[in-house]
Image (tube, rainbow, N blue to C red):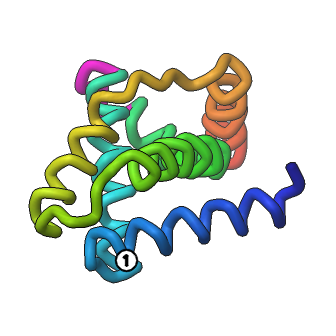
Amino acid sequence: MTKQENRQRQDYNRDKILDLLKISQQEYYRIQFDLAEEYLMEFFQGNVRMVMEYMSTPAFWSWWRSQYTIIDHEFWMNVSDDNEPWRLMKGYRTVHKMTSIFPSRTLYHKVMDNVKSKKHEQH
């Protein structure tokens, strides 16, 4: 899949979620950011330094958007839209929190390369 096709897929899934949950793009991206932070805090067992390193790396956000899009797609394909928006939102957050995803070794190395690069620039 090309970058453009991937971006179109992300946009399509995002728009489906916006419509289903009756939220704005800004709310959607805030939820995505908050869930990323919660995920990393749990994954790194509260190690704020590692959370901040990952959150400041474009490679993490590319990976996160990709994973998020997959979960969004599964959510809107399998949910009934006759529920109240608040109930759908609760289910949406739960699905994103319950899904077990793990960053690849490649992502880890990209983040660590970014850390080394920052340290090198500071000296």
Give the residues drawn in magenta, as a range. Answer: 44-49
Label tally: 1
Up the image or down, 101 lies above or below 70; here it is: above
Q: Nearer the viewer, residue 77 or 12?
A: 77
Q: Is residue 101 left or right of residue 97?
A: right
The residue lying at 28 percent from left, 56 percent from top is 80
The residue lying at 81 percent from left, 62 percent from top is 5
Q: Quadrant of residue 7?
A: bottom right
Q: Quadrant of residue 116?
A: top right
The residue lying at 28 percent from left, 35 percent from top is 97
Up the image or down, 24 lies above or below 105; here it is: below
| Residue hosting label 1 | 19
**Kind of residue at badge 1:** Asp
Rendered-image quadrant of the C terminus: top right
- Predominant secondary structure, magenta span: loop
The answer to whether residue 64 is seen in the rendering is yes
Q: What x and y, as percent, mark residue 64? A: 53, 44
Magenta stretch: includes residue 58: no
Q: Nearer the viewer, residue 18 or 112?
A: 18
The residue lying at 70 percent from left, 48 percent from top is 121
Q: Secondary structure at mark 1?
A: helix
Answer few, some or many: residues within 10 Å of disc 1's Cα (few below 14, many 20 plus, some between 14 and 19): few
Q: Nearer the viewer, residue 104 or 3?
A: 3
